[in-house]
Amino acid sequence: MRCDEARESVEELRGDALPAPIREHLVTCAACAAYAREWRLVEAGLRALAREPVPAASLGFAARVVRRLEGLAEAGRKSEELWERAGRRFVYATLLLALTTLLALLLPSSGPLRAPATTEAYFAGLEVAATANDSLFADEASSDFAPGRSGPTEGSSAKPR
Amino acid sequence: MENPPRDAQEVEWIKRVQRGEGEAFALLIELHERRVRALVFHLVRRRDEVEDIAQEIFIKAFRGIRSYNFRSSFGTWLGRIAANHCYDYLRREQKARVSYYWQMSEESSRKLEEAAEKQDALTAEQEIVVRDLVDMLLAQAPAGDRMILVLKELEDRSVEEIAEVLNLRVNTVKVRLHRARRRMLQQLKKWRQRR
């Protein structure tokens, strides 16, 4: 007989219901006998606790719970409304922001509603400079190769009179 | 909490509450109040707290009633909510106090033990002392041990029902029950050695 088995039986069964091998074990095993003794003491206390009268149901308990639930539901509705209002505001703000961004992207870069941006002015400056350079080279080219002007090719091809 | 969901009237009330008819919940409260109170009292052991805790349990039940699927009895489902709620309470409120047992003379405590061992009827004084001692042992037990001990020893529930309430396997309940009892006795032994 193992001590564990004996102790489990002691917990589950009343003294007189213990099978003979357990009772014999309790006679020979001092530790299990002490365990049984202590368990009986605790068991008596548990029984006494179980017998103790439970606080009686108080009058109107169900009504009080339902009232409290209604109060909580009301508070919940208010907080829901608050969240709904906050949510609506958030949606409006987001829409406004999106609209502003869209307008900013779609509007022409200059015009009556908008002055040219610095970068655009910079690139415009570069464009002007490039055009000026082009015309400079164009002048040079026209001076070298313009018809009716003396040039290396024309000069070389001219016959002496 | 042994009222089965097959009770047509109860099922009807539950369905009405699930559809949002709060008034039907009062009928369910009336049906289960006594059992919930008893469980709360046995677990918490404070008469002044029973009312508030029971109210909180029913409020939790109301909020979760849509998740009740009629698989277990409504009483068991409610018992699970009550057990969890009390478990949280116990973990927050674990308190120690002095027991009458330690104020007894050696002779009186020996007599008490003898009477308990023979499972004789205890005198009124012995009953108060032993009840107080075990009350204190329970108060000092870990919340999990206390849950299982109360359900078994004070609420007199079967191992199968405890398994359902605590969402455990039957064998796990048996093992935990034995461990909880053993730990309680170890605690008692410790106290005695310090005496």
Image (cartoon, helix red, strand yellow):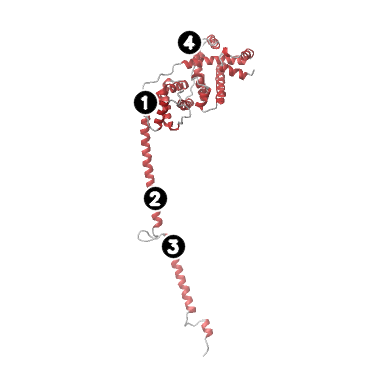
In the image, what residue type sits under mark 3?
Answer: Tyr
Task: Give the mark nearest the N terminus, 1 or 3.
Answer: 1
Evaluate whether label 2 is on the same chain as label 3. Answer: yes
**In the rendered structure, the residue with mark 1 lies on which chain?**
A
**In the rendered structure, the residue with mark 2 lies on which chain?**
A
Tell us which disc is closer to us: 2 or 3. 2
> Which residue was labeled with disc 3?
A122
Report x, y in % for residue B132. Answer: 49, 16
**Residue furthest out toward the bottom:** A161
Tell us which disc is closer to us: 1 or 3. 1
Task: Give the mark nearest the N terminus, 2 or 3.
Answer: 2
Mark 4–mark 1 distance (CA, rounded to whole Å) = 38 Å
> Which residue was labeled with disc 1?
A64
> Which residue was labeled with disc 4?
B125
Please say if the residues under marks 1 and 3 sit with CB atoms less than 8 Å apart: no
Please say if the residues under marks 4 and 1 sit with CB atoms less than 8 Å apart: no
* Disc 1 element: helix
Task: Give the mark nearest the N terminus, 1 or 2.
Answer: 1
Determine the residue positioned at 42% across, 28% down.
B11
Looking at the rendered image, the quarter that the C terminus of chain B falls into is top right
